[in-house]
Image: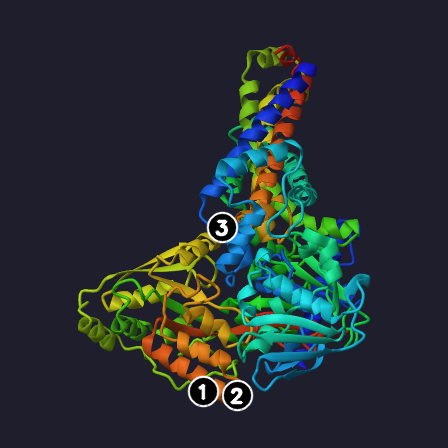
Amino acid sequence: MKKSSSPNTNLTRRHFLGLMGSTAAASMLPWDPLLAQTASGILRVRFGSDIGNLDPAKIFLIENQTVAGHLYNGLVKYDQKTNNIVPDLASSWEISADGTVYVFKLKSGVTFHKGFGPLTSDDVKFSFERVLDPKGGSAYRGQFAAIKSIETPDPLTLKITTTAPAAGLLHKLTAFNQGWIVSRKAVTEIGDKYSMQPIGTGPFVFDKWTPGNEARVIANKDYFEGAPGVNEVIFRVIKDETAAAIAIENREIDIFFALQQPDMIARMRKTKGVVVTERLANSTINLVLNTTIKPLDDVRVRRAMAHAINRKALIDGYFKGTKNEASTVLTPAFVEYSDDVAKYPYDPAKAKALLKEAGLGSGFKFVITSVGLSPYDKIPVPIAEDLKDIGIDASIQVLERAAYQQARSKGEIQSCITGLVGPPDPDSPLVSLYSTKSFPPGLNTSRYDKVDDLLEKAATTTDAAARKAVYQEILKRTASDQPVIPLYQDRLFLAHTDAVQGLVQNSLFTMQSYGVSLKG
Amino acid sequence: MFAHVGRTLLRLIVTGVGIVSVAFFLMRTIPGDPAAYMLGDYATKESISALRAKLGLDQPLWRQYTLFLSNAASGNLGTSVVTGQPALQEVMASIPSSAVLAVSGLLIAILIGLPLGIICAVRQGTWIDVGVMLGALAGISFPVFWMGLAAILIFSYWIPIFPALGSSNAKDMLTQIHHLILPALVLGISIAAYIARLTRSAMLEVLSQDYIRVARAMGVSERRIIFKLALRNAMVPILAVIGVTFAWSFGNAILIEAVFSRPGLGSMLLKAILARDYQLVQAGVLILAFMVVLINASLDLTYTLIDPRLKAA
């Protein structure tokens, strides 16, 4: 009884005040966006920052990736719920026994948006080759390092040959970043402006971008898996989370994407008519230690630091329990996850003993470098305090993003806080953080070099079970060596109004409106 | 008149070249690389250097500078590194929204500030004067982003009569105005405080002049003294300040745009600086500088309308 009556009073109050306002302004407007807008099938999603580049070869940042996910398909894709690799543009594929030849059969009758014609294997070849082209400057060239050649025996068949057995190749070809398929005709004709005039095969067609304000995509009625449940999606830039919370409470938006602040999560949970969903991310936030700088080259020092950090206090205190403790850089969202590794529970006495053993009983100077983005600028604070407790003279240096990137890739900083956002491909965090060939050149900031052999072995082991065993070996060795101290597993939060139906939250930090409908 | 236009043009060119040069070198002295920023965490060394070459960032600084100046002279301000769109086009697209906010904010400021200033000057020392000046002090002291957040909390949350989002892409004019009211009010109030204080002191100075005393002695009505004799003379410094605040309101607009999630020149510039989008920053700064110079030049013209003596000068 009470449940049903209170939203009513709320509405009446708003109507009343709206009426008051409109009397003053001579009946200015029908201030009821809820009824006015949801009825016409427009889904309004809050974005924390503006988009700027929708070219798959150069795309990054979750906002760009979210919009691109509405526009493009890949040969294969991650199932949003399970993270299993399932068909997308390819109807089937075969992998040769030695794991070096992949043959994909494409679905027929798939067409590009805005009259750019049918999808053929030549478009797929073009999409991958422009990423591989050294002159193209794609950020994801390293992802395709295993590819030797791409052939198109007929318009619906694609054959990829690799230099060595490439067990992880399917992960690199999923519908994300470099795996998204563009139209040769569109990219060639549109040229430099392609990045904001994208053409894909996906469930939504790019309509309009208003810089700093919003991006609009409209339903692709001819989508090969059926038309979407909404006519239009508006991605609205609202930087401040408080403003976004008020906006969803006023029904000015339908989905609060990238809900992060613990206080806002609690507030959204208490708001009537708003549903909060959450999902464990395939991402961890880590304190990366530079193993080439003394005394961090000593494993005892790194272990001492791991023991000194009170992760539970960080999670319960700052994050109010909205994160999970981590012991490896993979999370249970990865099929390859394992918890069977060395752990470093909070134990300042043991940490002090380890430091003493390393001959550093009087501590040393230590700087945590971090980027000036929430929460990366806040988590070094309790960590520095914890380290001070065991006698390490810890200080914090927060840089804005571009300067941080530069400092990190120079490799002269003692440590940094790194969170990797990527697909649920185990190579994504493991190669980036631990390989000397780390394709994001600055991300192996620890300069660690002890698992190159295992990473190589994982890449060439085609048997799934054996491959999983290799990954677990990597997790064990890196946990023992602690070049990277995992701090917590990220959990992703979304809030949406109860009008939003069928939304599936993924573990990738992005959001997909295909499958979503609005209750009138 | 022609001399005036000529002088304005010359000032426009000198200011333009100067400010753009400052922006050019300042942007390049802050650490960070546009190519690395644009490509994100997964960029390889080769892809970064390929992009740097494509953007011409591998050239020596003096070459980049001369190339930029010669291109700018022919009206080509380059393309945005991030979006690939012409920088000038992106800047121009962000101006209407900022201009609407700045103009409506300024109008509100004048409507509030000028009458309050006059009342305070006329009723100097009374409780009205003290109260308004205290209020003005508060208006100056509270940062606009704080006022913006407070306004959202009060008028879109506690008493939800205005939307929390300060802009709308709706075609319908009334909806747009409805979204504009809160941000414009906040901007207007922050500027009104300055205008009120200045109007008061300018009026007080004029009112203490001998000719006002003579006018009073001759029995000229108080209304005529205030509006015809005093205000007109006080207008020159007030106009000068309005000119300055207009430029300044574009600066404040950055904060207001952020709080109210409004697009505009301010938020575009901020985004461009963070992304080290050199071309976009340069184009934005150049256009902003031109606008300030033009506004000041047109104000110079209005001075002569108010005070004929300035025509000769």
Q: Which of the two residues, A40 or B121, is positioned nearer the viewer here?
A: A40
Tell me the distance, in whole angstroms, between the alpha carbons under discs 1 and 3. 40 Å
Q: Which mark is residue A443?
A: none
Secondary structure beneath dot 1 equals: helix
Q: Residue furthest bottom?
A: A465
Location of residue A186 by image quarter: bottom right
Residue B197 at what x, y percent from top left?
Answer: 54, 32
Residue type beneath disc 3: Asp
Q: Which of the two residues, A19 or B49, is positioned nearer the viewer here?
A: B49
Q: Is residue B2 above or below residue B167?
A: above
Residue type beneath disc 2: Asp
Q: Is residue A250 above or below residue A103?
A: above
| Mark 2 chain | A
Q: Quadrant of the N terminus of chain B?
A: top right
Tell me the distance, in whole angstroms, between the alpha carbons under discs 2 and 1. 10 Å
Secondary structure beneath dot 2 equals: loop
Residue found at x 31% / y 77%? A346
Residue beneath disc 3 = B33
Residue found at x 22% / y 76%? A349
Q: Is residue B39 above or below residue B224?
A: below
Residue found at x 63% / y 62%? A130
Q: Are marks 2 and 1 on the same chain?
A: yes
Residue found at x 43% / y 66%? A418
Secondary structure beneath dot 3 equals: loop
Residue beneath disc 2 = A463
Residue beneath disc 1 = A469
Q: Is residue B22 above or below residue A214?
A: above
